[in-house]
Image (cartoon, rainbow, N blue to C red):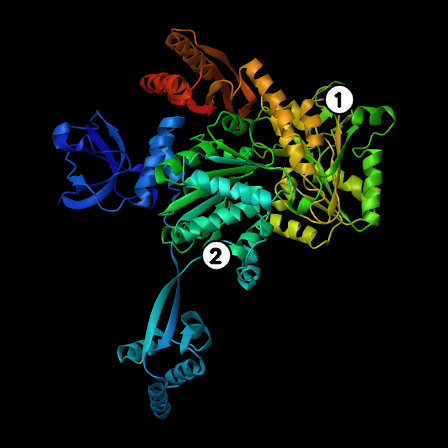
C-alpha cells in the first residue's frame, strides 16, 4: 500500500504530492488527513506531511519508494481535519482530490503579511531628555527632531512611515541610537479588516445584549440545546418571515462561545449586508468576522488566519465560509438554507448543507438550518426524522403577516392596461407615498430588456458564442449575460429586414423609468447586478433606503433576501411567474420561496404590511400557497408531484455533465457513457434520461450535454448511484477518447 503525501498546504504547493510506502504495521491505522513523519529530500530530513490519498498503485519504481516513518500522535491539527473533509468531498462528488483540496483549503497564492513598524523609546523619558540635550549640543538636528517627537507622544512611540516622511528619519540616523539602546524598532502584524466602509461605525458600537426571546423562541432554543446533548441530529427551524430566527441564532451562538468553541454562520452572499453584520457585531463585538466575495485576497487571508489563531470566534459568510479553519468548531448555522447559492456550480459540485453535516459529524459539532421556506429536501428529512424539526409560527412582537392579493395580469390586459404595474398596485403606491411610507417593487430579471425579437418574423438576437438570447441595455447595446459578449443593437431585423425589432421591456431599468414617469414626485433607487458592481454597492443602496433617502426600491432577488426595513408597508411583485417557466423540476418550489420571501418584507415594523402579486398564472399552487404563506399546503402539493414524477427527494438522481469544444466528440462520448450505465444496470433499477443539451447548450464556444440517472429505491445514493459514479470515473480514466471532454458529476438527493 502507498500514501500520497503533501508537505506544504500553504500556497500553490497543493498540486505537488509525494508517494511513500506504508509499512505493514501502519496500514490498519493510517487514514486520509493524518499527519505522518517522512524522510524528505536527498539528505532524508525528517519532516511532517499530510496524507491525501491511499492506494495500492505505485506511482513510480517501488524500489526507490521510501517508507513512512510513523504517524504523528500529538494533537490533531485543523489542517488534518479539513484534508479528511476534502477526501470525503472527493469521494462523494466525483472531483479530483486536488480540486477538493483547493475548495477546502483556499490558498491560491502566498499573500504577503501586512506589517506595521514603530519607533519607540527604550529608556526612560528622563534619560531620553538627557540624550536630547546632548544631540542639541552636537547640532545633530535629525536626532533632535526624532527625540523631541518621541518625548511629545504619550506612549513614547511613533509610526515608522510617519517618522520617515515628516521627520526625514533615515536608517543611518536611527541605527546608532538603536545600537546604543536608546531607541527600539518594533514590527507587528496588522490584520486587514473585513468590514470595509462599515469599520468605523462598527468600532463605535459596543457589545450589548439582544432582545429577550419570546416563549416560542425559548422553546426552540431549549429544544436545540437538548438535541445538542442527545442525538445531535441536524436541526431545522421553519420560522415565518419576521419570526426572529436571528435572535434564536444569537442565543445558540452565545451558548457555544461560553463552551469555548467557535461558530460558522452561513448566509446567502446577497443577504450579507451592513444591517446583518452590525446586529451580530453589537452583540459579540470583535469576536465576529466576515467573509464575502468582494474581499481582497489579503483581507480574506487575514480573516482565515485570525480564525486559525483564535482571534475571532464567529465567522459569517457565504458558502466558502464553511471551510473556516476553526480549531474547536462547535456549531454551523445555515440561514435561508433553501437558497440556491449554497450549491456549487463548479467542481466539486458540493452542497454546503451536506458538507456542513459531514464536517459537523467529524468535529462533533451541531448543525442548525433555518428558513421561512425550507427546501423540500430538508423538510422531507425533517418529516422522516433524519432532522429535528422546530417551528416559529408567529412574527416577533405579535406583528401580523402582510395582507396579500393576487392580480391577474390577463384581466389587466383585457381591460386595456398594458403597463407592467396593475391599476390596484398603482393606487396602493400613491397611498404609501402620500403617507411617507416606503415601497419595494420586485422583478426577477435584470438589464434593460429580457430579449430582443422581430415582431415580423420571430427572429431572436442570440449570442454567437452561447446558446442564449442577448439583452438590450442602455446605450443601445446587446449584451450576453453568460460570457459578456456585446454588440450594437439592430436597427433592422438581420433575417427579414423588418424595422419592427425591439426588446421585451421587462427589465429593472425599464421598470425604473416607468416608475419615475408614473410617480414623478417619488425618489427611486434601483438595485440589481448592474448597480452593485462596486465593492460597497450593496451596502450603499440598502443603507440609503434604510435612511429613507428613497421612497421606492426596485430590484431583483437581492432586495428580498433577509432585509429588514420597518417603514416598508407595500411590496409589489411585478412578474411573479417568470421563474415558473424554468426548465427545472424545482421551478414551483423556487417560485413559492421567492414570493413568500418577497411579501415577507412588508409590515416588519409597527405599521401593517400589504403585498400584491401580479401573475399570468394565478391558479398555480405555488402562487396560491404564497398568498396564505401556507408552507405545509405547498409542501403536500409539491411532494406529491415529486413522487409521481420520480424526482428528489422521493427519488435519487445523479446528473452527469459533459463539455467539449468538439460537438460531435461530445455527443459520441456521452452516448458511450449511457451505454456503459445500461450495461451496469443488470437489475434494471435505473431510469436514464438523455444525453441531451443543457438548458444553455453552448457557453463560450463549449458545447454542453447532460445525462440524468434516477433511482427510486431508499437509502441508495451511497450505494447504487455512488457505485455508478465510481465505475464511470474508472471508465473515463482508461478511455483516451475522453481526454478532450470535461465530465462532472452532481448528486440530487
Q: Residue at x 71, y 29 (%)?
A: 490
279 with respect to 745 (left or right) = right
Classify 591 as above or below 605: above
- x, y percent for residue 523: 77, 50
Image coordinates for residue 335, horizontal then vertical, percent = 54, 40
Q: Residues within 10 Å of mark 1 (few under 14, many from 20)?
A: few
Q: Position of residue 63 (x, y in %)?
A: 11, 29
Report the residue marked by disc 1: 497
- 278 vs 668, nearest the viewer: 278
- Which residue occupies the extreme bottom position in the image? 137
| Residue 56 seen in the current view | yes
In this view of the protein, which residue sits in the foreground, 125 or 597?
Answer: 597
- Check disc 2 and report the residue beneath it: 193
Q: Nearer the viewer, mark 2 or mark 1?
A: 2
Q: Earlier in the sequence, mark 2 or mark 1?
A: 2
Query: Which residue sits at x=70%, y=35%?
Result: 443
- Helix, strand or loop for disc 1: loop
Residue nearest the observer in this picture, 89 or 419: 89
Q: Residue furthest right?
A: 415
Residue 115, percent across and down? Answer: 39, 62
Q: Is residue 684 positioned above or below 63 on the image?
A: above
Q: Residues within 10 Å of mark 2 (few under 14, many from 20)?
A: some
Amino acid at each position: 500500500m502507498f500514501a500520497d503525501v503533501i508537505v506544504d498546504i500553504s500556497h500553490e504547493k497543493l498540486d505537488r504530492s509525494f508517494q511513500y510506502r506504508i509499512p505493514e504495521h501502519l496500514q490498519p491505522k493510517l487514514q486520509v488527513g493524518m499527519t505522518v513523519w517522512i524522510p524528505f529530500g536527498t539528505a532524508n530530513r525528517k519532516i511532517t506531511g499530510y496524507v491525501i490519498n491511499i492506494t495500492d498503485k505505485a506511482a513510480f519504481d517501488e524500489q526507490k519508494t521510501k517508507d513512512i516513518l510513523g504517524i504523528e500522535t500529538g494533537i490533531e491539527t485543523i489542517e488534518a481535519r479539513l484534508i479528511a473533509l476534502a477526501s470525503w468531498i472527493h469521494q462523494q462528488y466525483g472531483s479530483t482530490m486536488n480540486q477538493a483540496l483547493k475548495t477546502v483549503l483556499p490558498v491560491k497564492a502566498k499573500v504577503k503579511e501586512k506589517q506595521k513598524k514603530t519607533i519607540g523609546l527604550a529608556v526612560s523619558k528622563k534619560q531620553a531628555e538627557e540624550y536630547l540635550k546632548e544631540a542639541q549640543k552636537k547640532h545633530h538636528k535629525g536626532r533632535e527632531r526624532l527625540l523631541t517627537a518621541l518625548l511629545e507622544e504619550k506612549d513614547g512611540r511613533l509610526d515608522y512611515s510617519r517618522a520617515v516622511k515628516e521627520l526625514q528619519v533615515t536608517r543611518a540616523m536611527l541605527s546608532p541610537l538603536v545600537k546604543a539602546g536608546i531607541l527600539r524598532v518594533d514590527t507587528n502584524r496588522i490584520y486587514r479588516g473585513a468590514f470595509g466602509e462599515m469599520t468605523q461605525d462598527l468600532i463605535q458600537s459596543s457589545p450589548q445584549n439582544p432582545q429577550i426571546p419570546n416563549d416560542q423562541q425559548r422553546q426552540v432554543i431549549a429544544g436545540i440545546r437538548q438535541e445538542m446533548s442527545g442525538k445531535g441530529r441536524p436541526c431545522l427551524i421553519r420560522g415565518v418571515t419576521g419570526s426572529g430566527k436571528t435572535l434564536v441564532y444569537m442565543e445558540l451562538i452565545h451558548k457555544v462561545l461560553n463552551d469555548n468553541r467557535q461558530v460558522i454562520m452561513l448566509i446567502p452572499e446577497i443577504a450579507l449586508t451592513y444591517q446583518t453584520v452590525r446586529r451580530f457585531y453589537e452583540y459579540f463585538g470583535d469576536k465576529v468576522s466576515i467573509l464575502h466575495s468582494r474581499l481582497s485576497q489579503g483581507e480574506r487571508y487575514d480573516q482565515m488566519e485570525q480564525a486559525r489563531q483564535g482571534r475571532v470566534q464567529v465567522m459569517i459568510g457565504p458558502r466558502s465560509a464553511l471551510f473556516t479553519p476553526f480549531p474547536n468548531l462547535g456549531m454551523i448555522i445555515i440561514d435561508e438554507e433553501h437558497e440556491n447559492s449554497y450549491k456549487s456550480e463548479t467542481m466539486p459540485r458540493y452542497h454546503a448543507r451536506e458538507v456542513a453535516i459531514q464536517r459537523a459529524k467529524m468535529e462533533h459539532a451541531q448543525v442548525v438550518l433555518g428558513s421561512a421556506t425550507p427546501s423540500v429536501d430538508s423538510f422531507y428529512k425533517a418529516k422522516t426524522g433524519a432532522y429535528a424539526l422546530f417551528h416559529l409560527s408567529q412574527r416577533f412582537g405579535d406583528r401580523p403577516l402582510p395582507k396579500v392579493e393576487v392580480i391577474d395580469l390577463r384581466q389587466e390586459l383585457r381591460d386595456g392596461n398594458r403597463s407592467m404595474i396593475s391599476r390596484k398596485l398603482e393606487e396602493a403606491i400613491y397611498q404609501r407615498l402620500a403617507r411617507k411610507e416606503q415601497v419595494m417593487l420586485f422583478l426577477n430579471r435584470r438589464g434593460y430588456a429580457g430579449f430582443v425579437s422581430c415582431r415580423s418574423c420571430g427572429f431572436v438576437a442570440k449570442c454567437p458564442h452561447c446558446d442564449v438570447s442577448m439583452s438590450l441595455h442602455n446605450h443601445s447595446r446587446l449584451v450576453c449575460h453568460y460570457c459578456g459578449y456585446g454588440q450594437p443593437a439592430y436597427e433592422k431585423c438581420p433575417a427579414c429586414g423588418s424595422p419592427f425589432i425591439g426588446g421585451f421591456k421587462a427589465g429593472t431599468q425599464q421598470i425604473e423609468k416607468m416608475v419615475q414617469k408614473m410617480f414623478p414626485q417619488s425618489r427611486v433607487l434601483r438595485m440589481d447586478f448592474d448597480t452593485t458592481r462596486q465593492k460597497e454597492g450593496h451596502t450603499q443602496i440598502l443603507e440609503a433606503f434604510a435612511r429613507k433617502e428613497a421612497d421606492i426600491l426596485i430590484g431583483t432577488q437581492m432586495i428580498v433576501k433577509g432585509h429588514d426595513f420597518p417603514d416598508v408597508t407595500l411590496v409589489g411583485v411585478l412578474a411573479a411567474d417568470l421563474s415558473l417557466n424554468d426548465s427545472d423540476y424545482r421551478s414551483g418550489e423556487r417560485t413559492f420561496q421567492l414570493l413568500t420571501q418577497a411579501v415577507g418584507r412588508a409590515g416588519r415594523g409597527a405599521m401593517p404590511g400589504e403585498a400584491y402579486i401580479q401573475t399570468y398564472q394565478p391558479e398555480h399552487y405555488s402562487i396560491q400557497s404564497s398568498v396564505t404563506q401556507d408552507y405545509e399546503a405547498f409542501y403536500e402539493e409539491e411532494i406529491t408531484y415529486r413522487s409521481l414524477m420520480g424526482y428528489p427527494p422521493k427519488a435519487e438522481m445523479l446528473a452527469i455533465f459533459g463539455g467539449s469544444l468538439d460537438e460531435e466528440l461530445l455527443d459520441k462520448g456521452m452516448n458511450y457513457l449511457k451505454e456503459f450505465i445500461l450495461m451496469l444496470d443488470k437489475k434494471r433499477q435505473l431510469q436514464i434520461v438523455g444525453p441531451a443539451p443543457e438548458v444553455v447548450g453552448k457557453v463560450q464556444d463549449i458545447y454542453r450535454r447532460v445525462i440524468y440517472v434516477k433511482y427510486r429505491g431508499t437509502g441508495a445514493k451511497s450505494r447504487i448511484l455512488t457505485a455508478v459514479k465510481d465505475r464511470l470515473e474508472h471508465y473515463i480514466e482508461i478511455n483516451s477518447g475522453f481526454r478532450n471532454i470535461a465530465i462532472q458529476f452532481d448528486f440530487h438527493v
